[in-house]
Image: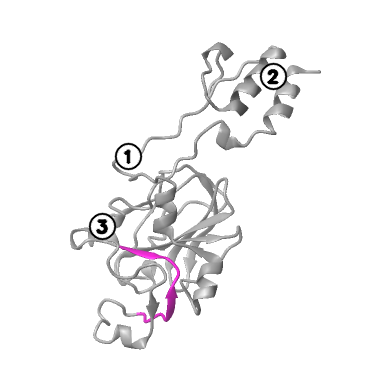
Amino acid sequence: MNKFLVFIFLISFFPQSTLAAQSWYYPVSDFSGRQSLKSFGQYFERKDYVGKEDIFPNQFLGYHAGIDLEASPSELNQPVPVYAVSSGQIIYSGFMSGYGGLILQKLEGDNLVALYGHLQQSGLPKLGSQVAAGSRLAFLGSAFSADTAGERKHLHFGIYRGVGSYYKGYETSVSALNLRWLNPSDYLLSQKALDPVRDYSPTPVPTLAPATSVKNSNPLIRLLVRILDFFGLKLSY
């Protein structure tokens, strides 16, 4: 049998995670320091907006299905980059009512989608494009503009289950919130996400090398190397 076909057959049984670690990043630099106004799952009703119309001109109601990451006063007239939290495909890119500029990104290796809202619409990635973890996706839209749907300058960021397009920024019940959405702060922390400015490092491309250079405690990797060596093939990662 053709050795290349044998290699393809064998490698198809191994999850990609055994060959290369998935990288995770926060969607903006200083992620925790920007969370001050609307948190995940926070309930909003009309009375919560009284006296705060200058901050919240659009008074959305329900359980907040993401987190808001604020621009600092010094950034109001400066570009604020937004980054891909993981590698994956863009499944929506453009205008959406209530958000202005919006990106939905299918996260690679998970049945999850990341939602990035209130973005500058010019320069958004193309629909269907693949983006790398930690790469720049867009910039925050200007305050109270069409790019933010009339909102202040901030990023609305959420992670939801499923692979289709879903746009809600608020849910009407706790059960609906928990059925669809993850707490993005908790999830990114569990993935050991890095700061996209301070810690960004492009994911290295695997290269082929002699099997004798492979040293790994993962039994699946060791087994695969032995099988490939039997067929005269080599693997490195």
Kind of residue indicated by mark 2: Ile
**Foreground disc of the pair 2, 1:** 2
- Identify whether 121 is placed above or below 135: below
10 lies left or right of 76: right
- In this figure, which residue is indicated by the disc labeled 1? 199
- Residue 68 covered by magenta stretch: yes
Kind of residue indicated by mark 1: Asp
- In this figure, which residue is indicated by the disc labeled 3? 33
- In this figure, which residue is indicated by the disc labeled 2? 227
- Give the image quarter of residue 195: top left
**Residue 29: x %, y % from top left:** 30, 50
Q: Start and end of the magenta stretch?
A: 58-69
Say few, some or many: other residues with alpha carbon within 10 Å of mark 2 (under 14 / 14 to 19 / 20 or more): some
**Residue 108: x %, y % from top left:** 55, 46
Q: Residue at x 69, y 34 (%)?
A: 13
Q: Is residue 84 visible?
A: no
Q: Residue at x 40, y 44 (%)?
A: 134
**Residue 113: x %, y % from top left:** 53, 57
Q: Secondary structure at mark 2?
A: helix
Q: Secondary structure at mark 3?
A: helix
Upstream in sequence: badge 3 or badge 2: 3
56 lies left or right of 190: left
Upstream in sequence: badge 2 or badge 1: 1
